[in-house]
Image (cartoon, rainbow, N blue to C red):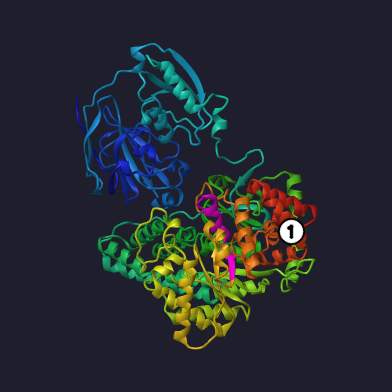
Amino acid sequence: MSRLQVAAPLAGFALPLSKVPDPVFAQGLAGDGVAIDPVGETLHAPCRGTVTTLPAGRHALSLDCGGAQLLMHVGIDTVALRGSGFELLVRDGDRVEPGQPLMRFSLDRIARGAPSAVTPILVSGPAGATISRRATGRLVAVGDFLFEVGALAVADSPAATSQPSDRRTFIVPFEHGLHARPAALVAAALKGLDADVVFAAHGREANARSAVAMMTLGVHAGEAVEVLFTGRDAAAACGAIERLLATPSQAVAARPVRAPDRASGALRGVTAVRGLAIGVAVPLSTPDISVVETSDDPAAEQRALDDAIAAVLKRLESRAAETRGLQHDILVAHAELVTDPELARRAVEAIGRGSTAAFAFREAVRESAATLAALPDARLRERAADLRDVGHQVVAELTGTPHQGLQNLPEHAILIAEELWPSQLIGLDASRLAGLATSGGGATSHVAIIAAAMGIPAVVALGAGVLAIRPGAALVLDADAAVLNVDPDPAAMAAARSQMESAAALQRRDRARAGEPATTTDGVHIAVYCNVGSAAEAAAAVEQGAEGCGLLRTEFLFLDRREPPDESEQAEVYSQVARALGGRPLSIRTLDAGGDKPIAYLPQPHEDNPALGLRGLRTSLARPDLLATQLRAILRTGHAGPCRILLPMVTEVAEVRTVREALDVARSSLGPGPMPPMGVMIETPSSALLAEQLVREVDFVSIGTNDLSQYALAMDRTHPELARRLDAMHPAVLRLIDCAAAAARAHGREAAVCGGLGSDPVAVPVLIGLGIRELSAVPAMIPRIKGLIRELRVVDCEALAREAIARSSAADVRELASLWLGSRGLLSGAMR
């Protein structure tokens, strides 16, 4: 018998396992121990021992510490990263000393690709090996006491006590093989049973009750394992494992492995910019820059940092002066980021503690980017890429690292990357760039916005498989279907070329008539407006044929600053947008922020579910001073063009009446003048069902299909596993749209759609059939939407809509609408 003291392998906050955001670890199914929420990026040996497990994903390892096995699992669900962001410093069988570095990892990569960086440190061993003391609820440094294991003893080998009573073979169904979670599920399935169970594979055996031992087998999804059952409850144990793993014929089907379809060479992702591209694969990687960590001359490091920031700022301002529109706005935003006072403060403090300027600034950026990446709002998460972009530029300047870009793109290049930064895309020759395909990223990132403005099809979130595509491989990027086809056969390539030619001809025709009204064949005008966030976007939308702005997002004025914008600043910005629209209508949405879009100067309590918390109009009503200032600014914008006020996330009539009273007070404070029309956004089932009451209080309604779908279908629209299933064409959502549109029609009010469905050509005839007479779309889709409307007849659309809301799923509705359009020769390549 002996005791084992385990030191902290990471710096961070020590937590009890019950606080780990994963039930397998929190319930102790994988073993007992302590977790650490890390602040460093190096895993150290917690004691003397021998490395016994190195999973293929490189995200975990275990040590044999003389009778006990220690498992250190960096992050939660990090097996899905497939080793990206992890660097092992030891090999199986290595003897290690306390404090020896075992692994380096990227907190930034974990924050972007995994639920949490919390790292469980678990112990497993013979019966009686228990933790007698542990340190939790406090910060620990590497080497600090973490926990003590007592009563270590050598366990008897199961095979030595009895003969096998049953032997079975199973196919492992788990997506990432026998990693920590499924190994723990196996152990849990055997609890309470008097049986010894041994898994055998690859010439090795493992006790099924030890998650660590099971991981040492290195079994992947779809591989066979032989399982030996002995003891009084062997039959029951066999049944438990069979229920967990299924039969050999059922196992793989029960949980299919997520991998590229090798037969067709197809990878599926998320559409960022619609379109079709044929080209060749051109990989772009941005390796981390190696930096020296410490310096004994803080003054010199501070001067170097100041000089590097000044150089990057000058370059950004120079490039911004040479561009216009969206690229100009993004470069200006990057110039603000590079001089951010909070980044500077953190870097200066680190330099004072002996860090080099490069290391200090890199860590400050990583910390801030990780915070952004953990936010619930998708748009704010994607701003982390902008921080990493400017951080890389400053570190490159400090270290004298040359620009790692693509100076000479081949023609028809389809760029392959884990993540693309705005500075990289802006610096490329757009005439040679056919498309973008990234393993990560988001559909609302700045890169996606720039690509849309450049007319470059883009698919994001394709997964790690896209990074394995060889340079020069032939590709067909079908961004409408969110599919990347690798090495397509001649027939598929010919079909894609024909489709591109037809789409190009249609695009030229639509673009030539973009400035004309969109009127159906039976004479009904459908207004096609734009959704924008700046004057530059509004000007670009007008060039695409926008007849007005159905949604101006105003939260861009309120975020990333220390105090709210005053009345004059808001009025000036809104007036710039109004002038860019050239007298066309402008719908200004009041501040849509709150739990999902946190604001530094608007402190709010922690919310477990921000989507259901203090957001949208609720935030403005909670801060009447902010609402009053914004209403006065909107009223002052009337001189620049016709304005409308749009209220987000309304759920009841009382909220509208409160805003109406505030608007009357604001109008009185400014003196005589016209009162702008006021409308509400239908974004919740409650507002759709109460539309009959709401329309009596307002002048128009605008349906936000993104949030309406989220709340109607109970699916978080930022959830990576649910994003592809969240479709506003679901008949339940269409029925809510029908309810709101019918109420508006009955009271002589206009009903608009300003959510994502307004930019979806397949949805357009259904929406028109439901009574929608105003669509607000992303600028790039406006010519196609208007061109399609001119080919439709309202009475036909009404019949289609009646059939659509009677269907049972979004897939059924999409198939119906696609066949309907196809039968009329209206299903173009840009609409599939």
Residue that mark 1 sits on: 797
Q: Classify residue 436 by image quadrant.
A: bottom right
Magenta highlight range: 700-717
Asked if 737 appears above or below 59 in the picture, the reply is below
Residue 205 position in % (x across, y down)? 41, 22
Q: Residue at x 27, y 27 (%)?
A: 67
Spot occupied by residue 109 in the image (x, y as percentages of width and height) = 43, 51
Q: Nearer the viewer, residue 70 or 410?
A: 70
Residue 775: tell me if it is visible. Answer: no
Identity of the residue drawn at 64% across and 45% down: 808
The one nearer the camera, 558 or 340, is 558
Q: Is residue 61 above or below residue 127?
A: below
- In the rendered view, tell whether residue 787 sits above or below residue 170: below
Q: Is 405 included in the stretch rendered in magenta?
A: no
Q: Please tell me how many numbered marks the rendered image carries.
A: 1
Q: Nearer the viewer, residue 753 or 91?
A: 753
Measuring from the top left, give residue 518's x and y in whole percent.
73, 69
Which residue occupies the extreme bottom position in the image? 672
The quadrant where residue 250 appears: top right
Residue 701, magenta (yes or no): yes
Q: Quadrant of the N terminus?
A: top left
Query: Residue 704: x percent and y percent?
Result: 57, 62
Residue placed furthest toward the top: 163
Q: Is residue 783 visible?
A: yes
Query: Quick one: SS at disc 1?
Result: helix
- Left or right of 675? Residue 499 is right
The amino acid pointed to by label 1 is Cys
How many other residues sit within 10 Å of disc 1, few (<14), some (14-19) or many (≥20)?
A: many
Tell me: 695 left or right of 309: right
